[in-house]
Image (tube, rainbow, N blue to C red):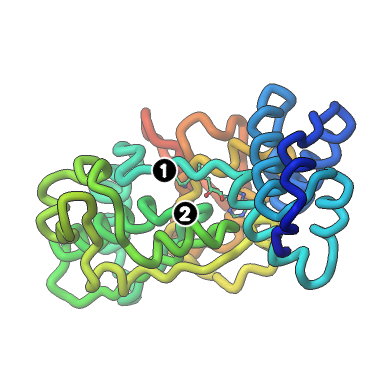
């Protein structure tokens, strides 16, 4: 969608968004991604849509909405808009108790029970990759400590946002994130590039594969028999019923003994016949029964 030169005066006075218009955009986002924008977050949605309209030379919501539905240009524009409409905040080692659970309880038990020699984890809604790299660091470090045998592991990191995935693939992060990584992990897994940035080492980057995937398509996920599914700070943006549906589908992708880790407090009263809640005071996790 090229910017229409000469449209600037119309663009500088983009219309306000009334409630019906807001409902239409919020509905589009929910249908396509599951993300619910409550009325209190209307300013966030309006800023994102209007910002993108300005960049593409649209002065009317109707025209932009129609162009978004054109095939195939609309699909390309959607990949940019969806990035603006979703929240990408993330950190390395964001919820330490969840990683402690993996390192000190789940992984030792899995290795003791005789792992099949390969371990596959999925970071669902990985944003710019910090969660996926944290998983890779924790798995690499602790597999090495627990076993002399070569146990291969890989992490699949998925998100709807292409720009976020591009950052993840580069493994390049701004300096202000450096201290999110504990010193002993920093020494092993990242290199300082310059005063402003650092990068995850290639050996670890090779263990993490990034791909665009919409969680709403989980029934068609090309992943199965996973050891670990990590899904934090994604479902909180979804409607309650949808969360349950998606969790049920995620449970079906776990191997016996596999673990589903959610954000603490993100889901209440979820139960599944094949899953047992892991007794842990700070982490919210479920084990797939053998
Ligand atoms: C707040 S970030 C959470 C990142 C990371 N999981 C963490 O806890 O730090 C939420 C991510 O979910 C992604 N997301 C939202 N809806 C999605 C969907 N339907 N499918 C896949 N990813 C989605 C967003 O693009 C965003 O990057």
- Residue 250's image quarter? bottom right
Q: Position of residue 3 (x, y in %)?
A: 70, 59
Quick check: marks 2 and 1 in contact, CB under 8 Å? Answer: yes
State whether residue 209 is above or below residue 190. Answer: below
Q: Secondary structure at mark 2?
A: loop
In the shown orientation, is residue 8 left or right of residue 120?
right
Residue 126: mark: 2
Q: Secondary structure at mark 1?
A: loop
- Residue 110's image quarter? bottom left
Camera-side residue of 58 and 120: 58
Q: Position of residue 29 (x, y in %)?
A: 74, 46
State whether residue 5 is above or below residue 97. Answer: below
* Residue located at (77% from left, 50% from top): 7
The Cα atoms of the two marked residues, 2 and 1, are separated by: 8 Å
Please give the residue where the numbered disc 1 appears in the rendered image.
Answer: 90
State whether residue 263 is above or below residue 65. Answer: above
Quick one: quadrant of the N terminus? bottom right
Q: What is the residue that sits farthest to the top in this orientation? A: 40
Q: Position of residue 195 (x, y in %)?
A: 16, 50
Mark 2 lies within 8 Å of ligand 1 (Cβ measured): yes
Mark 1 lies within 8 Å of ligand 1 (Cβ measured): yes
């Amino acid at each position: 969608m090229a910017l229409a030169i000469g449209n600037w005066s119309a663009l500088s006075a983009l219309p306000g968004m009334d409630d019906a218009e807001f409902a239409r955009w919020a509905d589009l986002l929910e249908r396509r991604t599951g993300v619910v924008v409550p009325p209190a977050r209307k300013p966030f949605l309006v800023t994102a849509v209007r910002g993108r309209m300005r960049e593409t030379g649209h002065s009317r919501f109707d025209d932009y909405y129609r162009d978004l539905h054109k095939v195939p240009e609309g699909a390309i524009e959607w990949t940019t808009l969806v990035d603006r409409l979703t929240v990408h905040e993330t950190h390395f080692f964001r919820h330490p108790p969840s990683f402690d659970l993996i390192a000190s309880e789940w992984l030792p038990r899995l290795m003791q029970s005789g792992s099949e020699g390969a371990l596959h984890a999925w970071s669902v809604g990985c944003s710019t990759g910090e969660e996926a790299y944290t998983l890779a660091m924790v798995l690499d470090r602790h597999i090495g400590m627990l076993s002399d045998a070569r146990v291969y592991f890989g992490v699949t990191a998925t998100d709807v946002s292409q720009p976020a995935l591009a950052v993840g693939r580069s493994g390049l992060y701004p300096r202000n994130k450096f201290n999110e990584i504990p010193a002993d992990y920093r020494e092993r897994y990242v290199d300082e590039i310059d005063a402003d940035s650092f990068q995850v080492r290639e050996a670890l980057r090779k263990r993490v594969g990034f791909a665009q995937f919409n969680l709403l398509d989980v029934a068609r996920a090309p992943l199965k028999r996973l050891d670990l599914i990590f899904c934090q700070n994604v479902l909180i943006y979804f409607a309650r019923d949808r969360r349950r549906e998606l969790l049920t589908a995620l449970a079906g992708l776990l191997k016996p003994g596999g673990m589903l880790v959610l954000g603490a407090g993100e889901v209440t009263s979820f139960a599944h016949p094949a899953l047992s809640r892991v007794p842990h005071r700070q982490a919210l996790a479920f084990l797939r029964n053998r």
